[in-house]
Amino acid sequence: MIEKEKVLSDAPKVLNSDNNPWEVTVEGDSIIGTWKWMDARFFTEGGISDEDKEFTFTVTLKDNGKWKEVDSTSSKISSIRKHNGKLSFSKDISFSKGKTYQKSISFGIGQDKESGKVGIVESRLDTSIIKKSIRDYLKQCGWKKAGLFG
């Protein structure tokens, strides 16, 4: 088994790639994979909405050669609409934490806020991909997923 400090220090070098739509960072004893899978402005006939959605997979290494993991998702949607000559504003914020599996494909006419490109905006999320990548790395380092009681 590779020691915890080496596993943590090597994680970003091993797991980050220009081909991956997520980024891995390390904070304390945790490897954090963050996938900002939606950051776009959508245009509809009656208004505009900004959508920002993120999935985070956090793996915390214990001193016994095992890890614990938790998922979290956040979503922020702000909208401006015009209906019957009146403007309305809305904002929806949601957050969840626990164990989850999500697979999503979204698209629409809008602007990708990262690139500034206007046109068809598409975003994809498959939580199993980021989880598998991090879990495989830890298994290769000789670590095991902790059971229900640690």
Image (spheres, grey):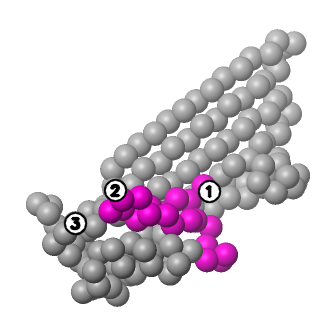
For disc 2, the marked residue is 70
> What whole-number distance in Å separates the C-alpha atoms at marks 2 and 1?
18 Å
| Residue 21 lies in the magenta-colored region | yes
Q: Give the overall secondary structure of the magenta segment.
A: strand
User: Which of pointers 1 and 3 lies earlier in the amino acid sequence?
Assistant: 1
Q: Give the Cα distance between marks 1 and 3.
A: 29 Å
Q: Which residue is mark 3?
A: 62
Determine if residue 133 is in view: no
Q: Residue at x 76, y 54 (%)?
A: 114
From this view, report whether residue 135 is shown above or below residue 74: below
Mark 1 Cα shell of 10 Å, populated few (<14), some (14-19), many (≥20): many
Location of residue 31 with respect to 54 vertically, above or below: below
In the rendered view, would you say 87 is above or below 116? above
Look at 60% across and 55% down and name the residue there. Answer: 36
User: Label 3 crowding class (10 Å Cα cut-off): few <14, some 14-19, many 20+?
Assistant: some
Question: What amino acid is at disc 2?
Answer: Val
N-term-proximal mark, 2 vs 1: 1
Query: What range of the chain is rendered magenta?
Result: 17-36
The circle drawn on residue 143 is: none
Where residue 105 appears, x then y in whole percent? 63, 59
- Answer with left or right where residue 2 lies relative to residue 76: left
Q: Which mark is residue 37?
A: 1
